[in-house]
Amino acid sequence: MKNLKSLVLLFLVATVSLVSCNKDDDATPAAAALEGKWQYSKQGTIVNGQEVLVDYDHATGCTKDYIEFLSAGVFKEHSFFGTSCEEDIFTGTWVRNGSTVTATVDGEASPAEILELTSTTLKIKYSLEGGFYINVYTKI
């Protein structure tokens, strides 16, 4: 009976240790995880401390808008619009420092806080004209 209690206690300690390690890993994802193509999924703001998100409005019948973080520190934002689905591409640079990613276009830097970064989801919060906004992307 004493051995059984010791085994159960050992199992619980090991489980708690593994859960703790996983949370630490998720809190500081690898920088390479940001690289790739991310399709706009949701957008919104923060009202009274609560996120208010709505589905991103893609142009009907067009390729869905997305951003690319390339390994060379270059990013491209692809937007599609109009009945002919014209494409606009904004190009700039990006740098990641911990949970902050800063995109620079035409010399104007825009820092954003990474709220969530997994293999399938990127969620950022940024400030614009005195308010906080949130974008959620899905990896494509």
Image (cartoon, rainbow, N blue to C red):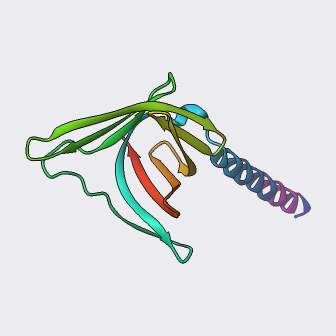
Q: Residue at x 44, y 33 (%)?
A: 106
In the orientation shown, which residue stands out farthest toward the left?
83
In front: 28, or 108? 108
In the orientation shown, which residue stands out farthest toward the bottom?
48
Left or right of 40, for residue 117 = right
> Residue 10 in magenta?
yes
On the image, the x and y values in percent for residue 35 come to 48, 32
On the image, the x and y values in percent for residue 133 come to 47, 60
Q: Quadrant of residue 91?
A: top left
Question: Would you say the magenta stretch is mainly helix, strand or loop?
Answer: helix
Q: Residue at x 37, y 58 (%)?
A: 42
Q: Residue at x 71, y 48 (%)?
A: 24
Left or right of 83, for residue 96 = right
> Residue 72 in magenta?
no
Q: Quadrant of the N terminus?
A: bottom right
Q: Residue at x 39, y 47 (%)?
A: 138
Residue 140 visible (yes or no):
no
Residue 47 visible (yes or no):
yes
Q: Quadrant of the C terminus?
A: top left
Q: Which residues are magenta?
A: 5-11
On the image, the x and y values in percent for residue 43 come to 39, 59
On the image, the x and y values in percent for residue 97 come to 65, 38
In the orientation shown, which residue stands out farthest toward the right?
2
- Total labels: the figure holds 0
The answer to whether 41 is drawn above or below residue 62 in the figure is below
The answer to whether 23 is drawn above or below residue 28 in the figure is below
